[in-house]
Amino acid sequence: MSVVEQMKGIHVVVVAVNNLDEAIEAYQKLGFELLNRTPREKWGLDAAQFNAGGGSMIELLTPVAEDKPVAQAVRKFLDKNGEGVYEVAIQVGDLDAVHRHVKEKGARIIAEPHPLPSNPARKVMWISPKSTHGVFLEFITG
């Protein structure tokens, strides 16, 4: 099985930023359409999504409650690397097949396939940046 056969395209490129308001303004000046801004209280984050065309998005993400593990991870990334690409999410057809493949190849899986909390009809899994040269890699269905 080839993972490429399961890939439907880039779902979202996530960019970690220090100041979400400034980043939103910068992307809007470049002509990107702001789709929404959503607090992610469960993870201690604030996020804004932009239409990137072709069904893809750019998401800006900043930590706001650094007592949450996900916010701590984003802060650690920002402190170590500065602002920049934090995660790339690839939409796939058969997540279970992708999971079997990457597991067989020895990738470090951070989260096994599971329903997306905000949309249980979709499933996600994450690969550690240690397996992808510094970028979180997400595979998502639907």
Image (cartoon, rainbow, N blue to C red):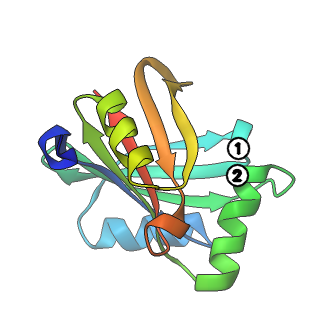
The residue located at (30%, 32%) in the rendering is 97
Q: Could you say where residue 50 lies in the image, as x and y percent from the top left? A: 33, 52
State the residue in front, 102 or 46: 102
Mark 2 near mark 1, Cβ–Cβ under 8 Å? yes
Amino acid type for the residue under numbered disc 1: Trp
- On the rendered image, what quadrant is the C terminus found in? top left
| Left or right of 75, for residue 138 | left
10 Å neighbourhood of mark 1: few (<14), some, or many (≥20)?
A: some
Residue 124 drawn above or below residue 2: above
Q: Could you say where residue 62 lies in the image, as x and y percent from the top left? A: 62, 61
Amino acid type for the residue under numbered disc 2: Val
User: Which mark is drawn over residue 70?
Assistant: 2
Q: Decide if residue 16 is in sight here.
A: no
State the residue in front, 4 or 27: 4
| Left or right of 139, for residue 109 | right
Q: SS class of the residue under badge 2?
A: helix
Residue labelled with disc 1: 43
Q: Could you say where residue 72 lies in the image, as x and y percent from the top left? A: 76, 61
Q: Decide if residue 91 is in sight here.
A: yes
State the residue in front, 23 or 43: 43
The residue located at (26%, 28%) in the rendering is 94
Farthest right residue?
A: 67
The residue located at (55%, 65%) in the rendering is 21
Q: CA distance from mark 2 to mark 1?
A: 5 Å
Q: Could you say where residue 46 lies in the image, as x and y percent from the top left? A: 62, 51
The residue located at (58%, 83%) in the rendering is 82
